[in-house]
Image: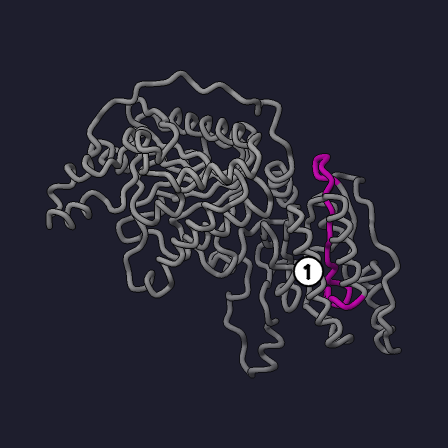
Amino acid sequence: MAAKISAHDVLELVLDAGSFVSWDTTPVDARPNEKYRADLQKAAEKSGVDESVITGVGTVRGRPVAVIACEFAFLAGSIGVAAAERIVSAIERATREGLPLLASPTSGGTRMQEGTVAFVQMVKIAAAVATHKAAHLPYLVYLRNPTTGGVFASWGSLGHITVAEPGALVGFLGPRVYEALYGEKFPEGVQTSENLYRNGVIDGVVPATRLRRLVHRALRVLIDPPTSTAVTEPAPPAVDIPDVPAWQSVMLSRRADRPGIRHLLRHAATEQVPLSGTGQGETEGTVLLSLARFRGAPCVLLGQDRAGQSALNTMGPAALREARRGMRLAEELQIPLVLVIDTLGAALSQEAEERGLAPEIARCISDLVTLKTPTVSVLLGQGTGGGALAFLPADRVLAAQNGWLAPLPPEGASAIVHRDTSHAPEMAAAQGIRSLDLLRDGVIDAIIPEHPDAADEAVDFSKRVGEAISRELRALTGVPESERFAARLARYRNLGLD
């Protein structure tokens, strides 16, 4: 189990030297009895702080950040009325001053000496966090060893980004309490930061020594304005897209070495902070979620990961719920959303049906088409079925030259119409699935060239895609929200009627 890191350690590791300014005042009087008063005095002497939490503001590479950090040495970091009031006051001040907030809990939960009134304090803390997020201000959480009980079940689990210390005990019911109540030990390895990361509850496991770097990268995406290079660039000269058979694009899009979203991040993103899972105990390797910048333009990047897909492992309901998390993040943080379509299709299985695949596709489409932030969708490769449609309806839709979009793979369409798969090339041509057809029909706005095939120029192609994304993001930024939203709805309302 990880050693305990003090609140002051967190400040020293994350903030610029000498930048911290405390916001703390004398703790409010929780009307302690004589024994509790003695416990408080002893805790203060042991820990060197006057409550289980310290708050204030500092800078991370010059950027102001509000900080809340628990001190486990003070009554196991437990939260009572005084600690809760200090936390809420700090959150409210950060909201008023428009500051991003870093919270670093380590706690056994509610302070038992204060009973139910302490327990209910978690509601007002959660409400303050919700108000902060409603103001479109970043809320970052770093869980330290241990974080349990009401703290984990309230403000410890509300971060836009949530990571935890390696080896940390993180869980709802502490193992000692579980054993006392049920007469047996809690299963080993469940309440650990690593297990929660594997199961999509938190975004990552990060040593305290790397927390400063993570906060810096996150703030570069979330609060920094577009960089000085982010001026509107002219579109490159038009390139004649070869009029090749649709089936050729289908075959090229299926090349195992075709660059996908990971190539795009590696070669075109100027900043990235990977996220993981739904935050609700689900994760899938078929999608990738990240904060990113493309040539200085910030966004939430959400895409289908061809490296995590196979014929036996396609997008399930959890992937779509993770996608909806990405949409919520973009809207809460008021930054654009970029989507990458590159999918074999949604899962066809009993499990997928019983876990609500079709309703999740519907909710993705509904959420995306009504999202308030600017959106750009990129058809990077295969675009099969509802899994592709769920990532499509954006303000601007781009397609790689050999990207394609269809209700079924051509083989499936052939099976329905001709009762065989041998007519797949014919169906691909007839259905208008290739990029040239999509452009003609108004499904996409522009084609990103391949010279002549993305797999043969993976780095250059990925950079070209990144430049196209950046260009679209900058163009959309200046469009009023109401105008963007009306245009997006009109696009799909009128599609196919011209």
Q: Quadrant of the N terminus?
A: bottom right
Does 406 appear in magenta?
A: no
Residue ID at (51%, 66%): 190
Q: Find residue 119 and report its image quarter.
A: bottom right
Q: Quadrant of the C terminus?
A: top left
Find residue 439 and report its horizontal and vertical position in percent.
33, 30
Find residue 421 and report its horizontal and vertical position in percent.
13, 46
Residue ID at (49%, 50%): 276
Does 75 appear in magenta?
A: yes
**Image colouring:** one colour
Spot the residue most to the front.
Answer: 498
* Residue 3, placed above or below residue 389: below
Q: Can you see residue 255?
A: no
Q: Which range is magenta? A: 59-81
Q: Can you see residue 414?
A: yes
* Residue 443, placed above or below residue 243: below
Q: Which residue is mark 1?
A: 127
Foreground residue among 173 and 484: 484
- Residue 239 located left or right of residue 94: left
